[in-house]
Structure formats: structure tokens, C-alpha cells
Amino acid sequence: MQFDLFHTYTVDAHTLEVLAYTRRFYRADFTDKFPVSTRIAQRLRRPALLYIAALYHDIGKGRGGDHSELGAVDARDFCERHSINEHDTELIVWLVKNHLLMSSVAQRKDISDPEEIQRFAEFCGSEERLDYLYTLTVADINGTNPELWNAWRGSLLRQLYTETRRALDRGLSNPLGRNQVIEQTKREAAKLLEYRGFFGDDLEAIWELRGEDYFLRERAEDIAWHTEAIADHENIEAPLVLVRHPLDSPVANTTQIFVHAQDKPELLVRICIELELLHLSIHDARIYTGTDGATLNTFYVLNSDGSPIASDEANLDYIRSSIETGLASNKSRSSTRRTPRQLKSFVMPTETHIRQDLDRGWTILEVATPDRPGLLARLGALFIDHGVALQSAKIQTLGERVEDVFFVTDMQGRALTNNTTLEHLQTAIRETLDGEMKQQ
């Protein structure tokens, strides 16, 4: 049996739910809830292939070994027994074998990086495979636990699908390089700022303080928004906090919070605490440190229950002023929220994993642990203790647990390559987080 707060169904019931969601993509009354999935599903060459992949995607669970590989063997046997042609057989087998891939890439990789998109596009190889995989992924997530499907998760998959489709349209032999993306973003942002009195030389002087990742990951509209607000901010010693209306956010229904402040080791921890005190949950965090000693921090947040934040101007202004006041205060603040009893009953040990991305010059730390209030602030404090700088984070809440991905460096912006340092960091994370759960 497979049953916890994350998986609300047993494997057999889950499979039926996935099939049901697959069918819903062909119904007009589900177009509003799944606009992208319904549009893609209805142009699939043979919908039956999607149903077969859905039927077999988890059939290998509980048999030992990789359930995706085991299911692919069973799917191939089914196709051969029913005389399905070779092309369609290979598509079904590929879908079963890789049904977890798109969700993993969307939620664990830096999908703003064109090289990451190129790798995923090369793996898919065709628009047909991408279309089938997207629809199967959405059905699988909703069939696992409908509460997992929210605006944030949907936007990540949509972004990955859209960028991969563009890469396939360009041709796999004609990849888009990082420098091309950066220069294009700068041109678009500069054009927006011309109407606000900013011109080439002024912008170059400002933007040369930012690293390449900032222009690689942020939209031109956001860069223009940041640039103008920072230039108009009179008290450079005080933090600048901006809160964007959800309708203007690049991610539907999420609220975008931007903080510009002088870099201090405890800054991230303090921001996380302020957001926690406001009962906001962080779903994505992007931290950029400039050569002028200032940091630009972007957070995409929802309410702690995963619902959108009330978007009236009074509430958004309250969020902004609360964060500004908290960051300006010299008093130490901490969250008083306790871990819900329901989560305490599903105690599992914290797991950590390290991998290197030497091309980007950072270390990728994955942390899987039971969810609890104030988790990101605690991890931020541990990073400070071990001389680790957080450059970016992807926060994934899966029922009772979180699977977070942190892109980190040392304080000089270099990848963490010392094995002793990495082992000490991982040990401290596991012992601290597991110790907390035992005490609560």
C-alpha cells in the first residue's frame, strides 16, 4: 500500500484517478481548470496511447527495483501482445519509463537556464513526446493528490513546456545560448525604461553591478521595475521592499515580493522570519549579490495553506510595510507557529544530497524533510554557521514533507568542493532538523 498525507490513494486507486484526469482533459467543463492540458490533449495523434501509458505508469510499484523501469517492461509486453506498431510502442514505453521526469525537472532544475532547457528538449526529442509527457504529468500529479496542483506548480510545468517547445521549434542543432538570452533581456528592459528617463549609459552603470544570473533568470519587466524603484529609493541604508499585485506577477495567483538591501549574513534569515510571521509560504527564492555590496532578493509566495494572497491594495501595502519595519528593527524576531499535530505523526528522517554544477559555479543541495513552520529560516541560519551563501532556492511542498533544492556557494561566490565542509553541513542539517521534530 502507498498511503500518507502526500499520496491520498493506494496505487490501484491512484491509477484509476490518473485515468479519470486523462479523460477530463477531453471534457469542455474542465477547460477552465486545465486550459493548457486540455488544449494539448485534444491535439494528440492517438489519445489511446496516453491512456495505456497512464495505466502502466505505476504498475511496477511494490515489486522491488525502479518501478518506472519495471512498468516499461510490462508496457512493452502489452504493446507486443496487442500488435501496436513500433513507433507507438516506443512512445508508450518512453512515457512509462520517464513519467516522473518533467515534474522533477520543473521543480528541481533551474529552468530559466537555456542550457537546462536544451538538455530536456534533447531528451524529449520531439514535440509529440513532449505533448504526451506534459499531459501524463499533469494527470499524475492530480491523481496523486489534487491539493498538490496549484498555480505555482502549474506555472513551472507550463514554463518548462513552453520553453522546450520553443527549443524544439528552433531545432536541436540551433540552441539558444546564455549570452543571447542575457542580451535580449537587457534590450527589452532598456526599451521599457526609455519611457521612464533611463538611457544606455545610465543603465550600463547600474547593470554592471549585477551578475549574469540576474539577467538570465528575471523577466525584462521585472528588471525595469527593480531598476526604477532602486533609483528612486532615497534612503540607501534602509531596505527597499516591493510587493507586486498577483495579476502582474509572472506566476498566476502568486504574489511577488522584492527586497533590495545591503548584504548581511543574516538578511535572508530575517526576511524568511518576516514572511513566516505573515503566514506566507515561499515557493521560489532568488538571491543576487551585486558588486556594490547590495542584494536583490525575489520571493514568490502564497498563503501558508497554499491559497492565493488577498490582492487588495491595503493588504499588499500591509505586507510591504510589515517586512520593511521588521528588517529595519534591531530586535531579534522569531516565528511562534507550531508544527501541526497531523504532520508530527508522519515523522521521517531528513535526507540530504549534494551535486555540483561547475558550469554555473555553484553547488546544488537537496533537502527532503518533514514540513514545519520556519523551516527555510532555520536552514538559512545553518548556512550562515557553515559559511554558505544561498544563491537560489526552489521550494516544493508535497503534503507532509518538503523537497527543497538550494543553489549555494561559499561567501566568495564559488562552488563548495571541500568534501569535509559538505559533510559537516549535511550532518548539521540532518541533526538539527530531526532533533527539532523529536522535541515538538
Image: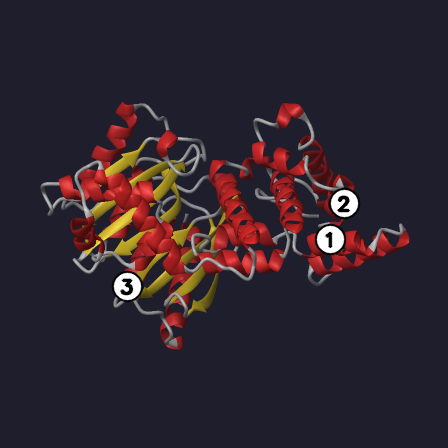
Residue 69, quarter of picture: bottom right
Of the image marks 1 and 2, the number of the one nearer the N terminus: 2
Q: Which residue is drawn at 37% across and 51% down?
A: 217
Q: Position of residue 63 (x, y in %)?
A: 75, 58
Indicate the position of residue 64 as horizontal and vertical percent values: 72, 61
In this rendering, the count of numbered labels is: 3
Report the front residue among 259 and 184: 184
Q: Which colour scheme is used?
A: secondary structure
Question: What residue does disc 1 label?
Answer: 91
Q: What element carries label 3?
A: helix
Q: Which amino acid does label 1 sit on?
A: Leu
Which of the pair 142/4 is nearer the observer?
Answer: 142
Name the spot of residue 281 as percent of width and height, x first. Answer: 39, 40
Q: In this view, does 45 lie to the left or right of 181?
A: right
Residue indicated by mark 2: 49
Give amino acid for label 2.
Leu
Residue at 24% across / 43% down in the picture?
226
**Residue matched to label 3:** 385
Q: Does residue 334 appear in the picture of this structure?
A: no
Mark-to-mark CA distance, 1 and 2: 8 Å
Q: Which of marks 2 and 3 is nearer the N terminus?
A: 2
Secondary element at image label 1: helix
